[in-house]
C-alpha cells in the first residue's frame, strides 16, 4: 500500500468517508483488548469498507487505511483500467515466471545428478 504513491489514483474527499475506531483483534493481549486503535473506514458512495490494525498507532493506522481504501475505490471505479489492477497483473506474471525458472533449474539439477550417478557406475 505504501509504494503506490506514484500511481494515478482517484482522490477521496473526507465528506465521503465514515471513520470509526474500534478494538482490534488477534494477538496482543491486554494492549489490544484495552485500546481502540483499529481504524474502520467506509467509503459511503461505493460502500467499500477497510479495517486497518497493522500498528499500535492510531495515526499510522488512519494513514494506511486511507491508502488501502484509495486503491480499492480506484479499482472499483476504473476496473481493468486501474493502475492498481495493472500492477497486480504484472507482479503475478513476474511471480509465475520466477516459479517457472525455479522449476526448470530443479529439473536440470535432477538430470545432472542422474548423469553423475550413471558415470560413477
Image (cartoon, rainbow, N blue to C red):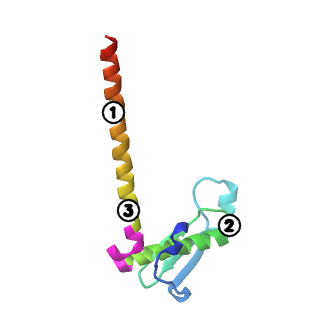
Question: In the image, is 21 to the left or to the right of 93?
Answer: right
User: Few, some or many C-alpha atoms within 10 Å of disc 2 (few <14, some 14-19, many ≥20)?
Assistant: few
Where the C terminus falls, by quadrant?
top left
Q: Which mark is residue 108?
A: 1
Q: Nearer the viewer, mark 3 or mark 1?
A: 1
Task: Provide residue 103's location: percent of width, then percent of height.
Answer: 34, 40
**Front residue of 83 and 13:** 83
Question: N-terminal of the two: label 1 or label 2?
Answer: 2
Is the Cβ of the residue at disc 1 closer than 8 Å to that at disc 2? no
**Front residue of 16 and 121:** 121
Q: Is residue 17 above or below residue 65?
A: below
Q: Is residue 82 magenta?
A: yes
Task: Provide residue 60's location: percent of width, then percent of height.
Answer: 64, 69
Distance (Cα) linking label 1 and label 2? 49 Å
Task: Give the quarter of the image for residue 21.
Answer: bottom right
User: Few, some or many C-alpha atoms within 10 Å of disc 3 (few <14, some 14-19, many ≥20)?
Assistant: few
Is the Cβ of the residue at disc 3 closer than 8 Å to that at disc 2? no
The residue stretch that appears in magenta = 77-86
Question: N-terminal of the two: label 3 or label 2?
Answer: 2
Q: Residue at x 58, y 59 (%)?
A: 25
User: Few, some or many C-alpha atoms within 10 Å of disc 1 (few <14, some 14-19, many ≥20)?
Assistant: few
Q: Nearer the viewer, mark 1 or mark 2?
A: 1
Question: In the image, is 47 to the left or to the right of 112?
Answer: right
Q: Which residue is mark 2?
A: 57
Q: Residue at x 42, y 77 (%)?
A: 74
Amino acid at each position: 500500500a505504501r509504494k503506490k504513491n506514484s500511481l494515478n489514483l482517484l482522490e477521496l474527499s473526507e465528506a465521503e468517508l465514515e471513520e470509526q475506531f474500534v478494538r482490534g483483534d488477534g494477538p496482543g493481549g491486554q494492549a489490544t483488548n484495552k485500546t481502540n486503535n483499529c481504524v474502520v473506514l467506509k467509503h459511503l458512495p461505493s460502500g467499500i469498507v477497510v479495517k486497518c490494525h497493522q500498528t499500535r498507532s492510531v495515526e499510522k493506522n488512519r494513514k494506511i487505511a486511507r491508502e488501502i481504501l484509495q486503491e480499492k475505490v480506484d479499482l472499483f471505479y476504473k476496473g481493468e483500467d486501474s493502475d492498481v489492477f495493472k500492477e497486480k497483473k504484472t507482479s503475478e506474471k513476474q511471480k509465475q515466471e520466477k516459479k517457472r525458472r525455479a522449476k526448470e533449474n530443479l529439473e536440470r539439477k535432477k538430470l545432472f545428478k542422474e548423469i553423475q550417478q550413471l558415470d560413477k557406475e
